[in-house]
Amino acid sequence: MTPTNYKDPEYFHKVVDCQYACPAHTPVPEYIRLIAAQRYTDAYMVNWESNVFPGILGRTCDRPCEPACRRGRVEEEPVAICRLKRVAADNKGEVKSRMPKIPETKNGKRIALIGGGPASLTVARDLAPLGYNIDLYCEQDLGGGMMRSQIPSFRLPHTVLNEEVDYILDMGIHTHFNTYVDSLKSIVDKDYDAVFVGTGAPRGRNLNIPGREEGAANIHIGIEWLSSVAFEHIDKIGKKVIVLGGGNTAMDCCRTSRRLGGEEVKVLVRSPFDEMKASPWEKEDAQHEDIPILDNHVPKTFVIKDGRLVGMTFEKVRPAYDAEGKRSLVPTGEADVFIEADDVLIAIGQENSFPWIERDLGLEFDKWNMPIVDPITFKSTHDKVFFGGDSAFGPKNVITAVAHGHQAAVSIDLFCQGEDLKNRPSPYTNLVSQKMGIHEWSYDSEVTTDLRYIVPQADKSKTLKDRKMEVELGFDGLTGYKEAMRCLNCDVQTVFTEDKCIECDACVDICPTSCITFTENGDEMDLRSRLLAPSFNLSQDILVSGPVPQTHRVMVKDEDVCLHCGLCAERCPTAAWDMQKFLYNTAKAGAPVHALA
């Protein structure tokens, strides 16, 4: 097998799996080490540079980083990456002085942002420090978009939301709140240099089955209902509530219903429980609040009696899978199920809606009535219009919207400078030895065996009576430290220099996971089978050195189970092993550019 170029930054980028999985590529191990050192403000700023909303995301992120965490390969649970982000946010000091300074003299370019959600706010955060004049149009009376209207206060307190939104709005953004944009042409005609659309996916899907129109007074679209609750237009609901849907919005609807008077709240979903789209922790929180989730129930009718909704009927189904694993739902043949309800919340998905975009502006739409948007530059077919967040490619999540905003800001800056949008800024990378002495490293390499710590929650008897009372309490300082110490420091790499190796096997002997093997070279699958601990996780690269001088064998290391503990480097008598920290930061608008291959 050809030796791996383990000094190639792209290789290390892929090894830091948690950072690679984060859409905004937040340097996860870097900020976790800072938390362990109680440098909370530094940890917050590392987060803020990438994900913009550490306090918000530390409570609400969908956590794509955690399934990628290599801790989950050596024990059941990954590091609580998301909740550690909250630790940094809750314990930070003063941060305003550490944020980018806004130039008094502007660059003469004017940008319009339509929508006040995470994508638009990220564009503003990246472009304001470069001297752009930015106008933000939002139909709500405060910024935040869906973070304000669709995430309940018991998950995201408004104090946290307002603080992090205001960090951006205080950068001199010209806000136009309570302003619904009903015409894109009207904005384009204002002679902005570029327009960014970050309006989200504002329309919830309806369910047109018998009884829908007759029972309309007590049948509500989930996201619209959540918004009405957030803005205090609705403060109560019936005692018996059915929530239709298996996603996170359904979980927010059922839990909010419990707080507004729902005594018998049930979630009914077509799919099997394990295949629901809701995050596992969202389902757990709903069940903790005594909300049953009934899976494999397909809605058939809204039942109306004397002109009023009294419940629903459901067909019971079971999942069946074909040879390719594709699922279909097959009726079980059992009698239909009737469930009583005073109110029904429909949370079966969200859709984009662009009635305010004229179809004669030169902005093309696809067959799903979505704007055609370049997935790299986020530019539409209109010369000046860019998209990001849910409005670009459909409903995702906050961290994806942030990632879109960063890339759209890069494109807008290049566009306004007359540059090629395909010439993207290079990411910032470096690789630095962590050696401080013969047996000392500039990071704590102790490997803990602690299992994942549980985030404490407020008393259920209190939280169910107050929809604004935050349920999760977050880690205290000591627990945050212990959880941070579970991180395997995946960005601190074991770098092997074969010319220094004398093949004493000290590293092999001391390795706690037997991930190091010296053997004859071969093709990859052959090598994987001949390791001390055979490696068959093909999604994770193995590290292969060049020939070592004595025997011309190669050193093979299985990255899948390496703990990055540094014991091999400490034990090596010739310093053939070193621990080097790889730092990767996604470039922002205004950085030097390079041409895409």
Image (spheres, grey):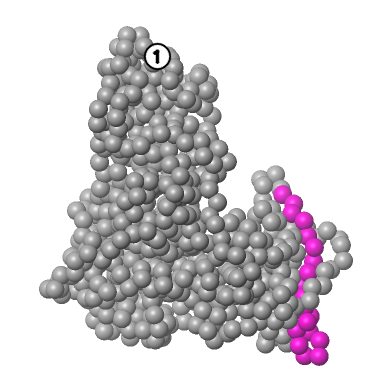
Q: Residue at x 24, y 63 (%)?
A: 99
**Residue 77 sits in which quadrant?**
top right
**Residue 121 sits in which quadrant?**
bottom left
- 50 part of magenta stretch: no
Report the label total: 1
Which element is circle 1 on? loop
* Residue 220 vertical position relative to residue 40 in the rendered view, above or below: below
Q: Residue furthest top?
A: 550
Q: Residue at x 57, y 41 (%)?
A: 76
Quadrant of the drawing holding the N terminus = top left
Task: Provide residue 590's location: percent of width, then percent of height.
Answer: 21, 60
Task: Provide residue 117's location: percent of width, then percent of height.
Answer: 40, 72
Question: Looking at numbered disc 1 in the image, what kind of residue is underneath it?
Answer: Asp
Between residues 283 and 130, which one lies in front from this camera angle? Answer: 283
Residue 435 in sight from this viewpoint: yes
* Residue tagged 1: 505
**Residue 519 sits in which quadrant?**
top left
Asked if residue 325 lies left or right of residue 357, the reply is: right
Q: Which residues are magenta?
A: 300-321
Task: Provide residue 11's location: percent of width, then percent of height.
Answer: 35, 37
Task: Provide residue 537's location: percent of width, then percent of height.
Answer: 52, 33
Mark 1 crowdedness (10 Å alpha carbons): few <14, some 14-19, many ≥20: some
Between residues 38 and 501, which one lies in front from this camera angle? Answer: 38
- 319 part of magenta stretch: yes
Judged by its main secondary structure, the magenta piece is strand
Q: Residue at x 51, y 79 (%)?
A: 230
Q: Residue furthest bottom?
A: 306
* Residue 491 vertical position relative to residue 121 in the rendered view, above or below: above
* Residue 242 vertical position relative to residue 12 in the rendered view, above or below: below
